[in-house]
């Protein structure tokens, strides 16, 4: 068909663009897929012969890259050439929450998206389909369209919204076997043709019935709403966990009992120290900001409460540690098991550990962290980003160990911040023997076997029990 895509470019080689394009290339050997990024180190890491050096850690990613890289999957810093060669361009750059000006702390910062649009407009000499892949507020497609149509050189553009629903840690299986693929576009003949071109790319591995096509607004909004609903479930069960702690109820029992109602469903009911990740908070803040801008105050307040609850859950966890340790943690070593926002990823964006750590450092605790995939530099930079105190002070209070037994040695308490499977397999007797007594465990993920720990001698605090 004349619309058959043979060349794709993706701008942004991060957590979304990298794995998504790797799978797309793996499943479409006839399409040349080039992933570009301004960050030369990142591109070098994607091209590293040693697959353990890939810039992001995702189970199974290395095998997909191994199969497709050099065949029809390429990583490059030459953004302009890749744009010009491609018939279809995915925009997969980061869209952090604004840290300045109007909408500060709430609206998405679209400066990287706008730069991409301007670059595409400048470089393109043939018609292009531009696909928004990054998580974006509703109406972004309109902004991109306006930039492309007003600074271009007579080239025709179609804009599609194709939100990413992959979760980190399971990105490859989510991409290979998605619940659905959502593609939004203009409902004009040209728009529908562009939608069909992208449907065809996915149809090589996703069943047709799972590929939904909508108008562009529905697609953009669905992404925000999906994440808002998921986050809301976590905040809902976390709110109940506080109630459980104040009563004899057990949040795991409650979650199981309600989850068996097919109308509620059992997933995403795991009480925790709070959700993190690059999406949940940002998307809800976007939803709140858009609602407010449209004068929908009650809708804005309703969703904002999900964030308020999440902040509360993190504070509550930190406060419980302080209170339990006789209201003083100053000068005490507290070990963190886990720093990533969830297991099986090295991503730390919005991780609960950052906020709990910050709060405990306010109380002058010495935090010693072990995470299987996050390095010391990343932890320091996460803490520094909060701007609570000087970088030097953060360095004195936060240390990182590459061995869990070193992290817990001589500590007064252990806090589990991430649900890494390996924490369950440790020699907990050895850990107990190396700690100050009484030895406390604060299990922010309800991961460990409380009874087994108590029989060793630990005093265990879990969520919602
Ligand atoms: C509810 C619970 O479903 C049931 O398990 C419990 O034992 C009693 O309370 P009920 O009130 O009989 O049952 O009806 P339900 O079907 O839950 O509907 C409650 C209200 O929600 C109705 O007014 C219904 O119209 C409304 N609703 C329900 C919606 O507006 N949208 C929906 O998607 C579902
Ligand atoms: C999320 C969405 O799941 C995904 O569809 C979207 O594309 C991006 O945002 P992600 O942030 O990678 O994915 O991870 P997710 O598994 O959703 O977890 C988010 C946070 O919620 C994590 O911190 C996790 O630990 C927490 N969580 C999740 C809970 O605390 N309890 C749960 O029951 C589920
Ligand atoms: P996400 O989770 O959305 O994938 P990341 O921060 O992991 O976010 O990845 C986004 C990537 O986009 C970064 O590697 C960044 O360097 C890249 N990027 C941002 N703006 C541009 C641009 N104008 N051109 C090329 N790459 C860009």
Image (cartoon, rainbow, N blue to C red):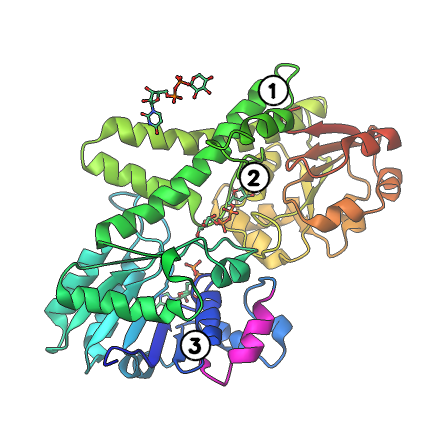
> Where is mark 2, residue-wise?
358
Q: Is 166 positioned to the left or the right of 394 in the image? A: left
Element on which disc 2 rests: helix
Q: Is 171 positioned to the left or the right of 426 in the image? A: left
Q: Earlier in the sequence, mark 1 or mark 2?
A: 1
Viewer-side label of 3, 2: 3
Q: Earlier in the sequence, mark 3 or mark 1?
A: 3
Is residue 4 found inside the magenta-colored segment of the image?
A: no
Residue 305, by quadrant, is: top left
> Where is mark 3, residue-wise?
28
Do the residues bearing badges 3 and 2 touch, measured as CB atoms within 8 Å?
no
Residue 180, by quadrant, is: bottom left
Q: What separation in Å lies between label 1 and label 2 (alpha carbons)?
A: 26 Å
Element on which disc 1 rests: helix
Element on which disc 3 rests: loop
Name the residue located 37 percent from the left edge and 64 percent from the top edge: 92
Q: Which range of residues does the magenta coloring cover?
A: 60-76
Q: Callout 1 environment at 10 Å: few (<14), some (14 to 19), or many (20+)?
A: some
The numbered dot on residue 244 is 1
Q: Earlier in the sequence, mark 3 or mark 2?
A: 3
Q: Where in the figure is residue 298, as x and y percent of width and height?
A: 27, 26
Name the residue located 19 percent from the left edge and 78 percent from the top edge: 127
Q: Where in the figure is residue 307, as x and y percent of width and height?
A: 42, 34
Q: What separation in Å lies between label 3 and label 2 (alpha carbons)?
A: 46 Å
Q: What separation in Å lies between label 3 and label 1 (alpha carbons)?
A: 50 Å
User: In the picture shown, does residue 71 fall above or below 289?
Assistant: below
């Amino acid at each position: 068909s004349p619309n058959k895509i043979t060349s794709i470019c993706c701008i942004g080689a991060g957590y979304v663009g990298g794995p998504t394009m790797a799978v797309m290339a793996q499943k479409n050997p006839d399409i040349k897929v080039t992933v570009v990024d301004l960050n030369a180190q990142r591109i070098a890491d994607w091209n590293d012969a040693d697959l353990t050096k890939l810039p992001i850690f995702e189970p199974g990613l290395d095998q997909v890259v191994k199969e497709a890289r050099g065949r029809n999957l390429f990583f490059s810093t030459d953004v302009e050439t890749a744009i010009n060669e491609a018939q279809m361009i995915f925009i997969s750059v980061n869209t952090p929450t604004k840290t300045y000006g109007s909408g500060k702390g709430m609206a998405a910062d679209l400066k990287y998206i706008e730069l991409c649009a301007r670059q595409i407009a400048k470089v393109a000499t043939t018609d292009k389909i531009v696909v928004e892949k990054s998580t974006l507020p509703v109406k972004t497609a309109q902004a991109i369209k306006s930039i492309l149509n007003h600074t271009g050189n007579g080239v025709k553009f179609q804009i599609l919204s194709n939100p990413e629903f992959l979760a980190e840690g399971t990105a490859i299986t989510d991409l290979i076997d998605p619940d659905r693929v959502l593609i939004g576009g203009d409902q004009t003949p040209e728009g529908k043709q562009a939608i069909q071109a992208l449907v065809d790319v996915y149809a090589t591995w996703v069943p047709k019935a799972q590929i939904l096509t909508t108008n562009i607004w529905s697609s953009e909004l669905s992404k925000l709403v999906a994440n808002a609903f998921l986050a809301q479930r976590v905040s809902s069960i976390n709110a109940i966990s506080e109630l459980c702690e104040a009563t004899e109820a057990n949040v795991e029992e409650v979650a199981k009992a309600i989850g068996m109602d097919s109308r509620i469903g059992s997933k995403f009911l795991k009480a925790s120290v709070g959700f993190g990740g690059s999406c949940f908070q940002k998307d809800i803040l976007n939803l709140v900001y858009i609602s407010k801008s449209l004068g929908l105050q009650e809708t804005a307040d309703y969703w904002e409460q999900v964030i308020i609850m999440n902040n509360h859950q993190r504070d509550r966890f930190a406060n419980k540690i302080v209170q339990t340790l006789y209201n003083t943690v100053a000068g005490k070593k507290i070990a963190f098991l886990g720093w990533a926002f969830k297991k099986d990823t090295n991503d730390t964006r919005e991780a609960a550990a950052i906020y709990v750590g910050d709060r405990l450092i306010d109380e002058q605790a010495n935090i010693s962290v072990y995470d299987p995939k996050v390095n010391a530099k990343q932890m320091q930079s996460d803490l520094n980003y909060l701007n609570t105190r000087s970088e030097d002070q953060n360095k004195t209070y936060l240390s990182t160990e590459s061995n869990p037994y070193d992290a817990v040695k001589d500590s007064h308490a252990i806090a589990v911040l991430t649900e890494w499977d390996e924490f369950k397999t440790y020699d907990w007797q050895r850990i107990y023997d190396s700690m100050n007594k009484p030895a406390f465990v604060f299990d922010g993920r309800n991961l460990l076997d409380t009874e087994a720990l108590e029989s060793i001698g630990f005093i265990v605090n879990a969520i919602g029990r």
